[in-house]
Amino acid sequence: MTIAEGRLLGDEESFARLGLDPVVRAPWEDGLRLKQPFKSGEWEWWYCDAHLDDGYFCVTSFHLEVDAQGNVTPFININIAKGSTIICDLKGLPVDAEAYSVSESECDVVFGNNLFRSLEGVKRYHVYVDPETTGGYGLDLRFDSTVPAFRPGTGRWEAGDRHFSWFCPVPGADVAGKLFIGGETIEVKGNGYHDHNWGNVPMDQILSDWLWGRGQVGDFTVVTASVRFHPDVGGAEAPLLYLTSGQEVLVDAYNDAVVCLEGVKIPQPVTGKKTSSDCIYIAQNDRLKASVRFDGQRTVIASFQWVNSSPDWETWYTRFPAKVTVDIERADGTRSSATDNGPLENMDFFGRRHSAD
């Protein structure tokens, strides 16, 4: 039996098949992408994070998962840290299955009193996590995008009829609002990010691991990823680099047009497996050569096991507070460089073998 090898789609036929415009990023792409009737193994989530001026970093995501009977389970994750101190790291916060709604035409995700909502296309968003439903931890943030929306090719990593898909409406944003921490309300502002993922099978069935990072670094906004397919579908690596200066897109590269090199690895705090905490992306076009380095500073600010379908392996997620450095050499010989903070994450679908018991 021939097994289809995994690849990140970017050809003209794939754009047409998926109903996507190669240039325009439309609001419906950030709406519900799963189609009813829902099928076992499907999933979808909307994610955002914010680096805030007073040292706080927060992440939240709104999830839908479909069980074997086709029933949908909605839940929320939220993580708040300050520097290297984890304040809360809450996973799988339940939502009444009768108290959720998701629009297909745009991002309008309502989970009870919690919401993840577009206020203007793919430019402005409001995200609210009610502290009354999380034991005192929450957020109320507005995201105003500062750069064009991004999709690497079609945004679809595909192996036959199985896929993992990604859309990034907000690669960078100005963020303002509030954090709720144990009964205290803290006014915050900083920079942020929002993306959207979905798929029709558990990720561990077609992916091996990924590195992902982002940052607002001086005048630059950067998003990177290196997604590796499962060995059973060829094991290919599909890296990407998106780099802007304000509204100007400097690099929009994926697959063979960009290289990702991994550096320092440290033991994952729970599994002990050597995990990349340092990487560099390199790309070149007719205007410039760019390199982007993420130095995770050998520090972990989030670590948890991710639910998967493998009978043999556990999936583990690790996040680092990285120093992000962008170096640009333009065709005319001028150079520019900047460094700032940003998240670096690793999702390892072969994190640790299940215990014998």
Image (tube, rainbow, N blue to C red):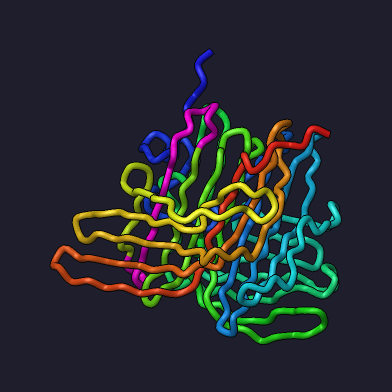
Residue occupying the point 79% across, 32% down: 356
Can you see residue 300? yes
Work out which quarter of the rendered image holds the C terminus and state it: top right
Q: Horizontal placement of 182 versus 86: left or right? A: right
Residue at position x 76%, y 67% from top?
A: 114
Q: Residue at x 51, y 36 (%)?
A: 229
Image point (56%, 38%), residue name: 207
- Is residue 331 rendered to the left or right of residue 65? left
Residue sitting nearer the eye, 324 or 9: 324
Relative image position of residue 167 (x, y in whole percent): 52, 53
Work out which residue is located at the far top of the displayed protein and give it: 1
The image shows residue 345, relative to residue 309, as above or below, that is: below
* Residue 237, magenta (yes or no): yes
Quarter where residue 134 is shown: bottom right
Q: Position of residue 156 (x, y in %)?
A: 49, 42
- Do we see residue 167 in this rendering? no
Left or right: residue 349 versus residue 355 is: left
Task: Say if 152 sits above or below 77 in the image.
Answer: above
Indicate whether 124 appears above or below 44: below
- The quadrant in which residue 71 appears is top right
Q: Which residues are magenta?
A: 229-248
Residue 349 falls in which quadrant of the image? top right
Figure check: 220 above or below 69: below
Q: Position of residue 37 (x, y in %)?
A: 73, 36
Where does residue 284 sit, x and y in percent of width and height? 25, 54
In what quadrant of the picture does the N terminus appear? top right
Tag count in the figure? 0
Residue 342 is covered by the magenta coloring:
no
Residue ranking furthest to the left: 332
